[in-house]
Image (cartoon, grey):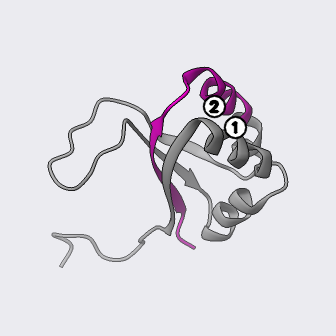
């Protein structure tokens, strides 16, 4: 079963409540097996529209990624984030098929 990912692009409008949002997420993401792969590091945006922060969270399965987002534990986090940031979030299933150069 392939892993799944939350891909989020975020513009923070109020940093103080956003810090609280970030702190409160650890327990929720851990409960569903979430693991940060990208967390607002340096980036370049050669095409399209950028946002100030980029985040990629890996989950053990597509269902776990959906369950985390839809969970009662994450619901208040959505409300908090929406009060202090604008985000685009995509939940996507990973790919386990052939890779370039593998025939």
x, y (%) of residue 57? Answer: 53, 48
Res 23 → quadrant: top right
Q: Quadrant of the C terminus?
A: bottom left
Q: Is residue 38 left or right of residue 3?
A: left
Q: Is residue 67 above or below residue 36?
A: below
Instruction: Determine crowd level at label 2: few under 14, some 14-19, many 20+ residues with C-alpha closer than 10 A.
Output: few
Q: Which mark is residue 25?
A: 1
x, y (%) of residue 76? Answer: 79, 45
What residue is shown at x 74% (from left), y 32% (from top)?
24
Q: Is residue 93 left or right of residue 44?
A: right
Is 85 in front, or is 9?
Answer: 85
Q: In the rendered structure, are the residues bearing label 1 and label 2 in contact, judged by CB atoms less than 8 Å apart?
A: yes
Q: Is residue 69 left or right of residue 46?
A: right
Res 17 → quadrant: top right
x, y (%) of residue 6? Answer: 53, 56
Asked whether residue 23 is drawn in magenta, I would say yes
Mark 1–mark 2 distance (CA, rounded to whole Å) = 5 Å
Instruction: Determine crowd level at label 1: few under 14, some 14-19, many 20+ residues with C-alpha closer than 10 A.
Output: some
x, y (%) of residue 12? Answer: 49, 33
Give the secondary structure at mark 1: helix
What residue is shown at x 67% (from left), y 33% (from top)?
21
Q: Is residue 43 above or below residue 73?
A: above
Quickly name the residue at label 2: 22
Image: magenta residue range: 1-25
Is 85 in front, or is 45?
Answer: 85
């Amino acid at each position: 079963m392939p892993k799944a990912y939350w891909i989020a692009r975020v513009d923070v409008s109020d940093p103080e409540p956003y810090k609280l949002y970030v702190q409160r997420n650890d327990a929720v993401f851990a409960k569903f097996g979430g693991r940060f792969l990208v967390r607002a590091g340096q980036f370049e945006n050669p095409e399209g529209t950028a946002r100030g922060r980029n985040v990629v969270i890996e989950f053990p399965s597509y269902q776990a990624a959906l369950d985390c987002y839809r969970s009662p534990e994450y619901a208040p986090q959505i409300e908090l984030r929406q009060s202090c940031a604008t985000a685009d979030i995509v939940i996507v299933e990973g790919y386990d098929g052939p890779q370039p150069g593998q025939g």
